[in-house]
Amino acid sequence: MKRITLPAPDVERAGEALWRAWVAHVLLDTFPGGRVPPTIADGYAIQHAMVRASGLPAVGWKIGATNRVAQQMLSLPGPVSGRLLAPFCFESPARLPASDFTIRALEPEIAFRLAVDLPPRDAPYSVVQVAGAVASAHPALEIPDTRLRDWDTLGASAFIADNSAAGRFVLGPAVGNWRERDLAAIDARLVINGRTVAEGSGADVLGGPLLALAWLANHLPDYGDHLRAGDLVTTGTCTPIRRAAPGDHVIADFGDFGSARVQFE
């Protein structure tokens, strides 16, 4: 496991403050305690503390910054992970209050549900091995959100501590023939109120969604966790990120792979 440098009480206080901001739908002007976590490991420790402070069950994981555009925009060295909390995950089509969000970012994604555990081990998991651990694949729409006013400039450790900007998650229906598909070749469109505002493909996610899933399987043990049977994993945006306004109807459209939809009320 990576070494945490912050004292445990500081980690817990920061996690609790971030969770209070989440519940209140407010933006913090400074990082809790006035000090940005000094290392990536400290950022993940605070993220875990925020999840503990919520008291809510986690149902899986988000992978963020799986393409270079997102990494450059957020000054991140590579992909990051966050937790998906049960009350903030919805089946498509969903209707969500716009007031529950601070930024309402939009990310069309391909998601997986795990069939078996992928416990820590010495050898890294391959793409073939993680694909074999998948129960189902889905079109999805992640709606990242933040508790930090300067979320895009505070650096990687603060972004990670803020649950890697996890907000809400909308899951589309399972795709029956997904193992016969080249997931990297699937086209994605982000549609707002009937107009396409962004386009991309599965290849924009670390070269393919299963490559992102393998990254997560090998990443989590460094921070004291691992993938488990039943976990949902959303693998990162297939298009450039856009934002929604109150009243918008949004579709993450993957053609014959399916779609995920949300109406902001």
Image (spheres, rainbow, N blue to C red):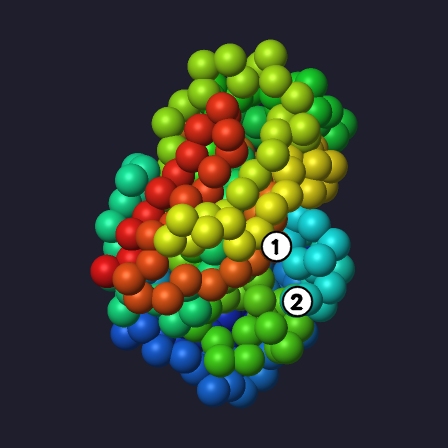
Left or right, 47 with reference to 55:
right
Name the residue located 74 percent from the left edge and 54 percent from the top edge.
68
Determine whether the residue tagged by mark 2 lies in a helix, strand or loop. helix
Q: Is residue 246 above or below residue 224?
A: below
Looking at the rendered image, the disc whose residue lies closer to the viewer, 1 or 2, is 1
Q: Which of the numbered marks, if any, corresponds to residue 110?
A: none
Few, some or many residues within 10 Å of mark 2 (<14, 14–19, 20+): some
- In this rendering, would 114 be left or right of 200? left
**125 left or right of 193 in image:** right
The foreground one among 192 and 114 is 192
| Rendered location of residue 81, percent (x, y) | 57, 50
Q: Position of residue 140 (x, y in %)?
A: 45, 39
Q: Which residue is mark 1?
A: 240
Question: In front here: 7 or 177?
Answer: 177
Secondary structure under badge 1? loop
**Depicted 66 relative to depicted 76: above or below:** above
Give the residue type that dot 1 points to.
Answer: Pro
User: Where does label 2 land, which residue?
Assistant: 74
Identify the residue at horizontal 56%, vertical 39% (top origin): 188
Kind of residue sitting beneath label 2: Leu
Tell which residue pokes out farthest to the front in this image: 195
Q: Which of pointers 1 and 2 lies earlier in the amino acid sequence?
A: 2
Q: Quadrant of residue 259?
A: top left
